[in-house]
Image: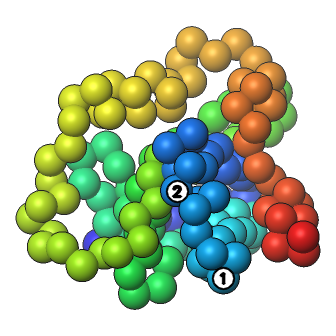
Amino acid sequence: MSRVPLSDEETKVIVTDPALKVFQQLGRGEQREIINRLLNIVEKFGVAKVSFVREQIANLDIIAVGDQCRLYTRLVEQIPEGNVEYHVIFLFYIDTSHDYPRDKLGKYSQSAEQFSDQLTDFNRVNKVEEYLEHHGALSANELEHLLSD
């Protein structure tokens, strides 16, 4: 486990299709827990000198939601766009039953790793805001709106 220092720039969340499919199968209470956790992280990005705890395995950042749920994510920080630097949290998978040995997490498919590397590579992105819009990136306000529905 390590702490990720956060800065005061714009933060977005991009939910991939595999994560969205799991999310849609969850009960409303579990969905709210996940949204609250993501909202808490996104809002804290706006406060200087705060951090959150994550576990890192290969190129994934694993964020706990309660005792059993884990969000398999990738955090890309300080993406420049004009006068703003963005942070993007990519949510790849939601695991609702974290009851397996830790050493079993160390291996996952090479194609999944390549997918996450390609999706999170901003070196070839000309317009970050267009990229975020195309991928349905969620802001803190949009996460709050989901909670109010």
Q: Residue at x 21, y 43 (%)?
A: 108
Q: Is residue 14 left or right of residue 76?
A: right
Mark 2–mark 1 Cα distance, whole angstroms, equals: 14 Å
Query: Mark 2 is on which residue type?
Result: Val
Contact, mark 2 vs mark 1 (Cβ under 8 Å)? no
Q: Amino acid under label 1?
A: Gly
Residue 128 versus residue 63 in the image, above or below: above
Give the SS element for disc 2: helix
Q: Is 131 in front, or is 47? A: 131
Q: Residues within 10 Å of mark 1 (few under 14, many from 20)?
A: few
The disc placed on residue 29 is 1
The spot of residue 25 in percent (x, y) is: 58, 62
- Numbered circle sitting on residue 22: 2
Query: At 12% from the left edge and 61% from the top edge, which residue is drawn?
Result: 104
Quadrant the N terminus occupies: bottom left
Q: Position of residue 143 (x, y in %)?
A: 79, 62
Q: Which structural element holds mark 1? A: helix
